[in-house]
Amino acid sequence: MTTIPSNLWSIPLIVAIPLLAAIVVNALYDKRAIRYISIISALLTLGISIISPYGYHWFTGHPAFDPTTFTFTFDPGIPGFRLSLEFFFGPMQQIMIVISSLILVFCVIMATSGLTKHQGPYLAMIFLLFASAAIIIMVNDLYHLWIAVEIGSLIVVGVVVGSGTSISHKAALKYAYFSAICGSGLAIALALLLGITGFPNVSDVVRVINIFGVGGMETILYISFGFFILSWMYAGGLAPLHPLKSEVYGASYPHATAVLQAQSKLMLVAIGIIMLRIFGTLPFVKEVMIFLSIITMMLGVVIALLQIDFRWIIAYLIISHSGLVTLGIALGTKEGIIGGIFQAVNDIIYMSVLLFCCEALYYFGGATSTRGSFGIAKKSPWLCAAVLLGAFAASGIPPFNGFQSEIILIQASINAGFPEIAVIILMVSVTTLIALLRAIYRIFLKPPENEVAANAQIPKSITIGTWLFIILTIIIGVYPDIALRFIVPFVEGGFLP
Amino acid sequence: MTSISTSYEKLKKFLDEFISGNGYTNIMTGYITGELQFLIFIIVLAALFRMFSFPLAIIMLILVTALALYFTPTIIGVEKENSNDLNRVLYWFLIYFAIIIAITLWGG
């Protein structure tokens, strides 16, 4: 990978455009211009993330100093400390941000066509949510990591409150309560790391630990890991915080949940990789991460079977599939990490398909309960086809994208010597299909027992968004290299040059 | 200790009471599938303890199987513990944190 020893122009824009858009739309409050400004901002962010070259942006301090050329450099061959607070935009960051900004585009369009009032503050929260996700996937220093996690958590609360129901207010309050605990926990973890190593840059921290060791302060490092993992649980909704996170997903508008789940996956990948880089060589660290992932996968999918609302079924499945993402990272092998990141990308895509279908059900009078049967398939066969294809993708059925990442995870588990984990992954896939088909049969396929809106007009943005993401699931499913060529170099290159 | 057939009866009785009238609804299928899946999940999870030591895995396997059969239908307990009440989440949060710190500090 080519290192660029200068600040990259595009990184500030990926973060600053959503931030500026948030300020402007919030100020405009209810004006019609909000729609156009939001869509243009989201498209600009998408465009910049597509065309941006790879490289760094540092805010303070400086990169490593090359004594032979008297210049600053990010070259890993130069044995110098970086001392910089920095963001890195590489191929893995690119694919994650591109997919997330694509979801942002459709989320903004759906929000502006579906919501009738108070659009400005709500969209501002959505933009801030995206900005926090973009920061966290690019971050390579402890200060920005804490800020991104903390702000990201608070913005989640804002987005959920924006959904405006009493359930969402309760969900937001509970989530905010744990934000105080886990945010402080992460701050303690980072302070301990800073105290042991003396460096805020993650690459420098890893270098100090690997070269000099921690001088008998392993206990402090373990306590730091314990607090670090709390923030991982919290940010991604891993067990035992999954009831709160699933409540957040279920209580938000489905288009907002699409951005929320993308942000969660980005956080899981980013924090997981940083944990692996810093603590990966310590005994029992990977084992703890593996067990946490498996428990999350199990509980998420089992509880999804008990739900009686399509939104909540999807909410728990998002939690369960977050466990798949973290499992790959927790395995710690190159194959596992590739599978974990690939699963995150795929998960964001196929869950968005299901969430957009769920959004469409709002136009049939909110027919998401599985207690009734609505016969939606007859009224909207294309919507039924879309939700079925989304369910197949989520269940890892070929030729959809879920199959490709799950097969990598299964192979990684077997190669790492854990065939039991491969069995659990298979069971999660099968149970996902059962949970989804149960709801799809009741809502879409069963002859109607309950009345729904006869002439529901589903906005074109939902239809286009749903089918675009279905096409993506098939393209990645048939030709996985289209996504893997972004992920493999990042993992094989040792995460950061 | 209870046998598989009586476990099924217990689960069915609970659901019949839970859903007055017809117990054979889609909710019933969800609960029964959830119960079976959960049992298999925890048995496989117990077997995974072999990554620490084989005797521990065998003990865990026997313990988990016995407890699962004794407390069946477990899905009711799982659903109850899955509550989003702050006190319950906080309780499990502290338990997890304590276990993680204990394992890493003592184990490492």
Image: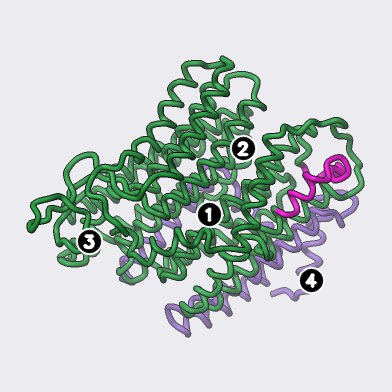
Chain colours: A green, B purple
Mark 3 chain: A
* Crowd tier of the residue under label 2, counting other residues whose Cα lies within 10 Å: few below 14, some 14–19, many 20 or above: many
> For the residue marked with disc 3, what is the amino acid?
Pro
Magenta highlight on residue A370: yes
Q: Where residue A259 sits in the image (x, y, percent)?
A: 54, 40
> For the residue marked with disc 1, what is the amino acid?
Val
> For the residue marked with disc 4, what is the amino acid?
Thr
What's the magenta region?
Answer: A369-389
State the residue position of label 3. A76
Q: CA distance from mark 3 to mark 4?
A: 64 Å
Sooner in the amino-acid sequence: mark 2 or mark 3: 3
* Crowd tier of the residue under label 4, counting other residues whose Cα lies within 10 Å: few below 14, some 14–19, many 20 or above: few
Q: Where residue A264 sits in the image (x, y, percent)?
A: 49, 47
State the residue position of label 2. A255
Mark 2 chain: A
Sooner in the amino-acid sequence: mark 1 or mark 2: 2
Question: Closer to the observer: label 3 or label 4?
Answer: 3
| Most foreground residue, A477 or A117 | A477
Question: Closer to the observer: label 4 or label 1?
Answer: 1
Q: Is residue B13 left or right of residue B65?
A: right
Q: Is residue A197 visible?
A: yes
| Most foreground residue, B14 or A307 | A307
Residue at x 86%, y 49% (from the top left corner): B20
Write down the quadrant of residue A363 in the picture.
Answer: top right
Mark 1 chain: A
Q: CA distance from mark 1 to mark 3?
A: 28 Å
- Residue A477 versus residue A439 in the image, above or below: below
Q: CA distance from mark 2 to mark 4?
A: 45 Å
Question: Closer to the observer: label 2 or label 4?
Answer: 2
Element carrying mark 1: helix
Element carrying mark 2: helix
